[in-house]
């Protein structure tokens, strides 16, 4: 298999697993091929990727929290028109969007840099 395809194609059925299969996996070593349902994982991406994505995600949350805090102190007049529920919902949506974005970036990175292998039985 071409080296650039190693992270994109399922080692079981040789079909492109797509970006979404990686994004929706709870962990990068818990991917399931959308075509043949084989459990696959990225080679040599165990704990460090989880650590890296957690760090990125926490940083993103911190930036959002900081921005919200900033907005609270400078744009009080806008926020005073929102209820606590609406505000919570907005923060939730922002965090989800950014979290998803982070996941997509990581998934793209894995697709072009890592190799998919069939998961070893734990
Ligand atoms: Zn497959």
Image (cartoon, helix red, strand yellow):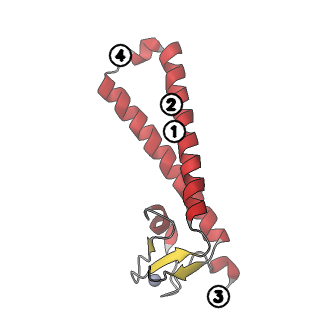
Disc 3 target residue: 1
Quarter that holds the N terminus: bottom right
The residue lying furthest to the right in this view is 3
Residue 11 - label: none
In the rendered image, which quarter is residue 46 located in?
bottom right
Please state which of residues 80 and 118 is positioned toward the viewer in this rendering. Answer: 118
Residue 81 - label: 4
**Mark 4 or 1, nearer chain start:** 1
Image marks 2 and 1: residues in contact by CB distance under 8 Å: yes
What is the C-alpha distance between the residues marked 2 and 3?
45 Å
Q: Position of residue 95 (x, y in %)?
A: 46, 41
What is the C-alpha distance between the residues marked 3 and 1?
39 Å
Q: Position of residue 75 (x, y in %)?
A: 49, 15
Quarter that holds the C terminus: bottom left
Disc 2 target residue: 65
- Tag 2: Cα neighbours inside 10 Å, few (<14), some, or many (≥20)? some
Residue 13 higher or lower than 48, as above or below: below
What is the C-alpha distance between the residues marked 4 and 1?
24 Å
**Mark 3 or 1, nearer chain start:** 3
Q: How many marks?
A: 4
Disc 1 target residue: 61
């Amino acid at each position: 298999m071409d080296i650039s395809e190693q992270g994109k194609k399922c080692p079981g059925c040789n079909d492109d697993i797509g970006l979404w299969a990686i994004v929706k996996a709870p962990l990068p070593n818990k991917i399931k091929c959308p075509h043949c349902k084989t459990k696959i994982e990225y080679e040599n991406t165990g704990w460090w990727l989880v650590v890296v994505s957690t760090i990125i995600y926490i940083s993103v949350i911190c930036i959002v929290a900081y921005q919200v805090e900033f907005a609270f102190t400078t744009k009080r007049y806008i926020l005073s028109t929102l209820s606590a529920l609406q505000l919570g919902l907005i923060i939730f949506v922002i965090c989800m969007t950014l979290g998803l974005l982070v996941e997509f970036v990581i998934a793209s990175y894995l697709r072009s840099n890592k190799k998919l292998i069939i998961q070893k039985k734990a």
